Amino acid sequence: MFSGSMVALVTPMRADGSIDSDSLHNLIEFHIDSGTDAIVAVGTTGESATLTVAEHCDVVGQVVKQVNGRIPVIAGTGANSTTEAIELTQYAKDLGVDAALLVTPYYNRPTQEGLYQHYKAIAEAVDIPQILYNVPSRTACDLLPETVARLADIPNIIGIKEATGDLSRVEQINTLCQTKMELYTGEDANTVDFILAGGQGVISVTANVAPAAMHDMCAAALDNDAVKARQINNDLALLHQGLFVEANPIPVKWALAEMGKIPAGIRLPMTELSEKYHRPVRDALVAANVLN
């Protein structure tokens, strides 16, 4: 259903932490003009952990309205409470999103059976395409390929954002699921290899600041043009690294502010980028040709 460069969109905020709707709308137009293939609203990069439920739903609604069907909108609706995840997913469906992205329950450390039952319950409660999201480095919980294969039998679970950095999982999941699941990487740096190995795209942090290049890189990889894809990736390599010098989304929000796209607002417990990283991130933006 989805492929290419899908941006894990930041949520623009003013200095006081309030949501900046004007900047949000401008970012959406920036992405559509730049060829971004889908927008993920209020995922973990969108600071879902610090938005209230009302704010969460409001931002998703703003994105859906502004996009107006021009590209797909995927809403982050994961939670470590199954009941809350169901409620958020239902809200997102009611707002008109094309799919939901559901991070594995964090902190709880459920068993594989618990993960299966969690996702099964959400899928059965809300009839909307759903994408699993596995990011053990942030959740202390690893959704194993065997569990993904069980979940692939549920019709509206259509894909997984696999952010372990382990490329072997592409073949494992494709084999176990008999290609019934779409695979998207959550690691910008391995996007080209991930797609060439059989994935469909990336849910990207880098695309926030270099959307056109990420779109072109993914398109080349999907066309199996490894040479062109790797050439584009070479220009983005410093950016992939620089946007993770501190916890996401600290560096990417600083980068967007440096580009004049958003104010320098972020919510506690996240803080603004440490001064010692300003030069490396700025240099990475210049290397990627998105800042002079």
Image: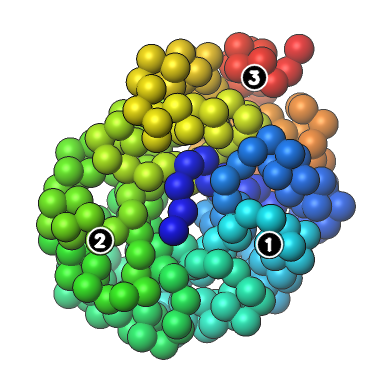
Between marks 3 and 1, how big is the CA–CA gap?
30 Å
Q: Is residue 237 left or right of residue 194?
A: right
Quadrant of image for the N terminus: bottom left
Q: Residue sitting at 40 percent across and 31 percent down? A: 223
Helix, strand or loop at mark 1: loop
Of callouts 3 and 1, the N-terminal one = 1
Residue 9: give x, y in percent of width and height.
Answer: 62, 48
For mark 2, give the secondary structure. Answer: loop
x, y percent for residue 225 = 38, 22
Q: Which residue is mark 3?
A: 285
Q: Can you tell which mark lies on residue 69?
A: 1
Label 1, label 2: how far apart the Cα atoms are: 25 Å
Q: Which residue is identified by label 2?
A: 180
| Crowd tier of the residue under label 3, counting other residues whose Cα lies within 10 Å: few below 14, some 14–19, many 20 or above | many
Q: Secondary structure at mark 3?
A: helix
Q: Residue at x 71, y 70 (%)?
A: 61
